[in-house]
Image (cartoon, rainbow, N blue to C red):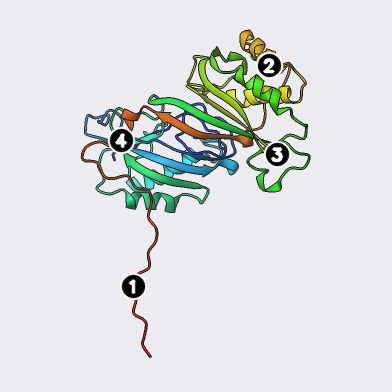
Amino acid sequence: MSSLNFAAAGTATPALSELPLLPDFTDDALRSINFRLNRNDGNTENGDKAYKWRLVIAYDGTRFSGWQYQQSTPTVQCLIEEALTRITKLDRDKLRFQVAHFLTPFNYESLDSIHRALNGLLPSDIRIREIGPVVPEFHARFSVTSKIYHYRIYNDTIMDPFQRHYVYHSGYRLNADVMIDAAKQFVGEHDFSAFANVSRNDRVPNPVKNIFRCEVIEMGPLLQVEVEGTGFLYRQVRNMVALLLQVGMEAVPVDIVPRILESRDRRELAKFTFSVPPHGLSLVAVKYNEQHLDFPEGGPAASLGRHHSLGKCKLPSF
């Protein structure tokens, strides 16, 4: 039997968001993720022509143990993989997840049917928003130019029960002004070793990351930490937010950020704070090399889903 070659980027962090999943997502909460599934090098392992496909996936990760495949607990990757093998009738044994794209040995004339079938097989908290072809150069991990994370904090005495699954509650009064100042200290190219937890699945050994922006936005009782960078280490964003919370509580000064960065020692950060829980975290955007998002010649149009329609019927006349 032919094999379905499926690759997906990294582990997962569920939270409210919308974009492709990449190697640094290692937390759990609500999130909407924009997946890129594509063609690999244009050939299967035996040299035959192959086709890659891009998926845009949204899911609420609350009840899952992250994205990455695990035998003992349900994950988003596992359910999508199972749905694809049922629909394509391809062998699951050689599936491998590295990035958000999958490879088939055959082409599709239309993607509407497979799109509808995938959503029919998946649970209601996982949706395929889009499926489409892309050029062989596209890679869901290596074509990325930057990623954007949000972490939401509810800063009031009583937590809003309707947001409890997706927003972290801080019962301490936070000084947003000093948090804003401290967040700016993360911008630039730094070694983030002090902000990374050890992970056996970490496929990004280089701890130097370039942070384009790190902002704290006030929205009533909500504080939203927005971080954009070239990449992130395991739990890096959550650890950055944890330190910003300590600054906001005025337990540590603003200049603690460069001091801990310079230490390059995770134990130094642990002296001042613990990591925050995952449910406030969202991956909201992944930016790609635009040239790698082009459609290949001869490929079908992308499927964005279709509205149901009512057939015309004649009413009896009286």
* Residue kind at label 2, given as amino acid type: Leu
Secondary element under disc 4, as helix, strand or loop, is loop
Q: Earlier in the sequence, mark 2 or mark 3?
A: 3
Identify the residue at image location x=36%, y=43%.
131
Q: Is residue 138 visible?
A: no
Q: Position of residue 227 (x, y in %)?
A: 56, 26
Mark number displayed over residue 312? 1
Q: Earlier in the sequence, mark 4 or mark 1?
A: 4
Q: Which residue of the protein is positioned furthest toward the bottom in this rendering?
A: 318
Mark number displayed over residue 134? 4
Q: Is there a contact, CB below 8 Å, between mark 4 and mark 1?
A: no
Label 3 packing within 10 angstroms: few (<14), some (14-19), many (20+): few
- Location of residue 121 with respect to 95 vertically, above or below: below
* Residue kind at label 1, given as amino acid type: Lys
Identify the residue at image location x=31%, y=28%.
291
Q: Which residue is mark 3?
A: 221
Q: CA distance from mark 2 to mark 4?
A: 42 Å
Identify the residue at image location x=62%, y=8%.
262
Q: CA distance from mark 2 to mark 3?
A: 27 Å
Q: Earlier in the sequence, mark 2 or mark 4?
A: 4
Q: Position of residue 244 (x, y in %)?
A: 68, 23
Q: Earlier in the sequence, mark 1 or mark 3?
A: 3
Secondary element under disc 3, as helix, strand or loop, is loop
Q: Which residue is mark 2?
A: 269
Q: Is there a contact, CB below 8 Å, between mark 1 and mark 2?
A: no
Q: Earlier in the sequence, mark 4 or mark 3?
A: 4
Q: CA distance from mark 1 to mark 2?
A: 66 Å
Depth check, front residue: 174 or 109: 174
* Residue kind at label 3, given as amino acid type: Pro
- Location of residue 58 with respect to 305 vertically, above or below: above
